[in-house]
Amino acid sequence: GKAVMKLDRDFQIGEIDKRIYGSFIEHIGRAVYGGIYDPGHPLADDCGFRRDVIELTRELQVPIVRYPGGNFVSGYNWEDGIGPKDKRPKRTELAWFAVENNQMGTDEFCEWSRRAGTDVMMAVNLGTRGADAARNLVEYCNFSSGTYWSDLRIQNGYKEPHNVRLWNLGNEMDGPWQIGHKTAQEYGRLASETAKVMKWVDPTIELVACGSSNSGMDTCYDWETTVLDHAYDFVDYISMHQYYGNQEDDTPNFLANTMDMDHFIENIIATCDYIQAKKRSKKKINISFDEWNVWYHAFPENEKAVKWQEGPSFNEDIYNFEDALLVGGMLISLLRHANRVKVACQAQLVNVIAPIMTENGGRIWKQTIYYPYLHASVYGRGTALDVLVDSPKYDSKDFTDVPILDAVAVESEEKDYLTIFALNKGMQDLVTDCDLRDYPGCHVEEMLVYTSPDLKLSNSADCPDRVVPHTSSDYKLEDGRLTVKLAAYSWNVIRIR
Ligand code: AHR
């Protein structure tokens, strides 16, 4: 097949907020215990944090990490996780039916984030709690001193405030599975009143209201309409969550899910803007896509999970190569909407549906999905540019006219690099012409290609480098015209200077 990509300096989508390369750590499975925190590990630092996990978090240049949930936060008493560790209670944790020992808490996570070079996005519990616990947590984290909660933080060893700027008002409150699930009316009121007092404590914070848990929720869009009707003036972002799976082993249909993601984002933007119009407001509500990934491999194993364990193996999806392709496609979708998507968190960072895997006390390795995330985070900062694509299309079970080629470009912050991210979703190589005459004298500095002889291959602790990207020289650039062969089922990063 053949395809054409058209690029132009003026095809600007918008500035990329680096926070779209965020991640997520929840108190679930081995994300915290055995993941970021493993005090018995030979590489543990003085706080018990695994240095190798911090190193990979730094390599990924993760700008922000959401914490402590997820469904977990909807039953969490944050006060359980502060102060002397030997005094902290063990609790029944009702989101995942585990025992939470509270050895990690707010202070430790903020400290971990500093060591990992990332910011914190903190979620408050609007399931079993409300405005009071939330405003106290803001005071504990962000107030300098001289009040009950700020002085308690100082007493607990943190003289300087944690300065958490971005906050989630609960998690997936539209979902019947949520501890303390609410109707849109109930949640819209609670989110507004909680937002109000949190901002009274610290007017510099930004707040995210819960949107729909996925595009298939019956209440999707009605939920946002009602919630924003109440909360529009009090919040800054609405959240989106989305996971995809390939349970039916239908690769073309699985990879076409990027179209669902595009539509979902565009429909949420439309819903936000409808409320803006209705309220005659000058303010725009932007999107925090604070959970996204592939998630399905661990579902059968989860059925067998034993309840009431501390840090059990749970939701440890082992990702194959085709999952990495969809992750690349989801990153392209986020970049394509960079003007409105200001925050996004790949869920999650370590062990639980994660790019980084660890053994308790042992080795660390990178899953297939690590690589597109790495490429986008490192090379995808600056201004997002639309790429006009003309490519063959296909129909799949749930989608029609799916372009085989999906692409977006990024002009670097220093304006010295143009990076094209291109996904070939087809089973054949695609010879692609790209008009670069708007970039006179440019050359290809590097081309990274991620392919695999078998879509179902994964990495593991024993074979950590089975599926890794390589550099390619399968391109020709003459007179501003780039011709490149995009391999069948491939993720490509073309760096032009
Ligand atoms: O990331 C795993 C879970 O997925 C989160 O706890 C929840 O918010 C979502 O349903």
Image: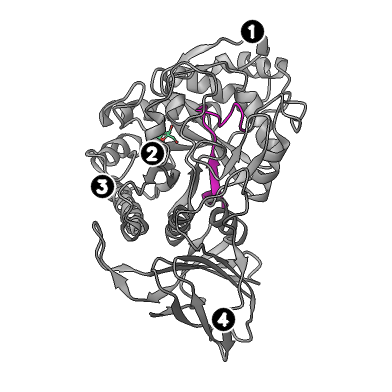
Amino acid found under the numbered disc labelled 2? Asp
Q: Which mark is residue 475?
A: 4
Report the number of discs: 4
* Residue in front for this viewpoint, 343 or 95: 95
Q: Quadrant of the N terminus?
A: bottom left
Residue occupying the point 69% across, 42% down? 117
Q: Of callouts 1 and 4, which one flags the residue occurring earlier in the amino acid sequence?
A: 1
> Alpha-carbon distance for marks 3 and 2?
13 Å
Q: What crowding class fits label 4: few (fewer than 14 Cα within 10 Å), some (14-19), or many (20 or more)? A: some
Tell me which image quadrant ligand 1 sits in. Answer: top left
Q: Position of residue 103 (x, y in %)?
A: 62, 18
Q: Nearer the viewer, mark 4 or mark 2?
A: 4
Disc 1 to disc 2, how far (Cα)?
A: 41 Å
Kindly identify which residue carries mark 1. Answer: 87
Decide which of tag 1 and tag 3 comes sooner along the chain. Answer: 1
Give me the C-alpha separation between circle 1 and circle 4: 62 Å
The spot of residue 420 in percent (x, y) is 53, 70
Which residue does the numbered mark 2 point to in the structure image? 233
Q: CA distance from mark 1 to mark 3?
A: 51 Å
What's the magenta region? 17-35
What is the CA distance from the residue labelled 3 to the residue labelled 4?
51 Å
Q: Residue at x 44, y 56 (%)?
A: 322
Amino acid type, callout 4: Tyr
Residue 28 falls inside the magenta stretch: yes
Q: Is residue 30 above or below residue 79?
A: below
Task: Report if the beta carbon of the residue with label 2 is closer than 8 angstroms to ligand 1.
Answer: no
Q: Are marks 1 and 2 in contact (CB under 8 Å)?
A: no
Disc with the residue nearer the chain's start (3 vs 4): 3
